[in-house]
Image: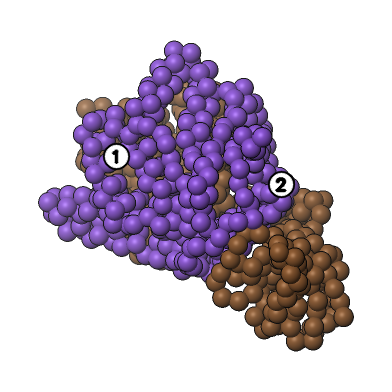
Amino acid sequence: MEQHETRQVTFHGEGAKLFGIYIVNILLTLVTLGLYYPWARAALLRYMYEESEFEGSRFTFHGTGKEMFIGFIKAIGVFLGLYCILFAAAATRSTTITLIGVAVFYIGFLLLIPIAIHGALRYRTSRSSWRGIHFGYRGDRKEFLNMFIVGSLITLCTLGIYGAWFVIEIRKYIFKHLRFGNITFSYEGEGAAFFWLNVKGYFLSLITLGIYSFWWVKDLFGYYVNNIRMYQGETRLTFRSTATAGGYFKLIVINMLIIVLSLGLATPWAIVRAMHFVFSNIHIDGPLDVNAIAQTEADYTDATGEDLADIIDIGIV
Amino acid sequence: MYNFSVRYHDGRLSIAHDATLTLMPDHWLIHYLDPSGELTSVRWALSGIVTDENFSNLYIFRYGEFPQQTIEAKDENLPPMLKKQYPEKIFFKRRVTDIFKLNNATIAGVALAVLMLLGLGYWFGLPWLAGAVAARIPVSAETKMGETMYDNMILAYDVDHQLTARVNDFAKAIDFKTEYPVRVTVVKEKDANAFALPGGNIVVFDGIIRKMKAKEELAALLAHEVSHVHYRHSLRNIFRSLGGYLFLSLLLNDINGVATVLADNSNMLANLTYSRELETEADRKGMDVLKSNGISLEGFVDLFKLLKSEYGDAGSLKLLSTHPLTEERLREAEMRAKGQDGIAENIGLQEAWAEIGLLQKK
């Protein structure tokens, strides 16, 4: 009987409410020449978390506009610094110095990516809770940075082929260090399987003029979800994707139509549809004692990574 | 004594206790049965209670240091009761975001109003702002900018120095009524084209001069381009497209790629419409200049006929063209030429034109 135990996160968001949030956010961001942006993001995240329910309780995002504003200013400072180096180097009108400046700019930019991912994970997980129990990320920045640099270099040297193994390695690292109270996680994917999945998806999509791409995204989503494990003490729980290519086809085509036909205005409804799709297609199988998750993580309020990731446009969760 | 049923989380374990909240004068009391069946009570001092900002009708309060204790209440009567019981403590701050709690019709109404405001701002506010900003740029800065643009641009062309000197003599015989120094550069290009840069530099392709039959045509062309300079059209155009770009990127920052592409393209179309308006203005002001110089407006009529024979008149392209339809411009010029009086012969202009003609026969 325990084998049949399965749970889901449900999303209750409404397009109209999300639309209202977007409109107010856009207006205030415009009026304040962009300064309101961190508060806008905080409001959006609060709303999305609040509408996500698990076992009768809603999730909470604790981040505040103020925290995110401080992070935003720091992140902008980092970017301004990089651009200043670039422009100062270009202003010397010396080819060597300009080239060094450009190199520093790009290397700095590349280093920012892992730093941003790390910071964003630390902040986002720490500010997320359910029934008062906080999530957490215990990854080590130096370790992650090293892994990222080595992985990027190998990927570059192998003309991108190692990329598949690299992605899996990152996922493994992140899940290994993810916490939800005393619950731990792991990711069981393998580089080779992920690589062939992508090769197959790429070529079949080419041959079928893109029609196969719906199966490809389904497979990618499945490979991500099906390899997540969750541990409560000795108990192991598995994640299971029920997404189908047909489901993806319906989601993507209708969302495209919604966005294009409304000239982008109905985007919030498309987002709500996508959230419904994702949550309704993830099942958590196994006997979970939802009353016994204990608080383990410490507080963390530095939002710089979150804002950096947002500026570089890295989407996490 | 007021009691409310709530859910309580102690911040240590994920168990949800069904609890009773009692509002005491200076603190809250929370009672619940713990799993072993024992009645447990928790005391929250009023000053440490924080209300969660939220968008729904679930009221969440937190208390204490991290990890915080939490209560969730759904009772609609709780907020008014809190206000009555503790008039000195504000539990629910009024915020702009409160409109999210209104019903969908109100949100849609507000959204529509905001969209209309944004639209008005984009279509009328931006061009006005572009003009206002352009008007505040000092002439010296504009001239310097124009010079830099000119220096970079002219490298790509082969300048006809003799023709340049003659056309400048020709231009000096016309009073353009502008404080900008008008400097014409003729370059060797076959196309019938000319453009003006901020600050007074005008580049004319020799192709268009060769096709001209009368001095009035050249006068009309120069008058049109000088109007661009005088009314700072380049600056206004730059600020308009820059403003439009900033406006849209702020607006769509959060939204997806498809919407951004759509918006970029419509912004480009809007820019084209704007530059067509500027062209029409340059035509009109250019005609005023010719008129006050006693030069026949037939110059404009002939110039447009020349352009028409060069480029044809593909009506379907109107939406995508920076210039107004040649047919429309021609009709406008013909109308104004009909009513013109006070045409006077200008000896200086005549002589300069003869020189240009001589140079081209060589």
Q: Are marks 1 and 2 in contact (CB under 8 Å)?
A: no
Residue A292 in picture, x, y percent from top left: 60, 56
Q: Is A156 rendered above or below residue B77? A: above
- What crowding class fits label 2: few (fewer than 14 Cα within 10 Å), some (14-19), or many (20 or more)? some
Identified by mark 1, the residue type is Val
Residue at 46%, 18% in the rendered image? A205
Position of residue A29 in the picture relative to residue A144 (left or right)? right
Residue A127 visible at all: no
According to the picture, the residue beneath numbered tag 1 turns out to be: B186
| Chain letter, disc 2 residue | A
**Could you say which is closer to the camera, residue A2 or residue A278?**
A2
Residue at 26%, 50% in the rendered image? A146
According to the picture, the residue beneath numbered tag 2 turns out to be: A12
Residue B72 in picture, x, y percent from top left: 73, 64
What color does chain A have in the rendering?
purple
Figure chain in brown = B
Identified by mark 2, the residue type is His
Disc count in the image?
2
**Could you say which is closer to the camera, residue B52 or residue B261?**
B52
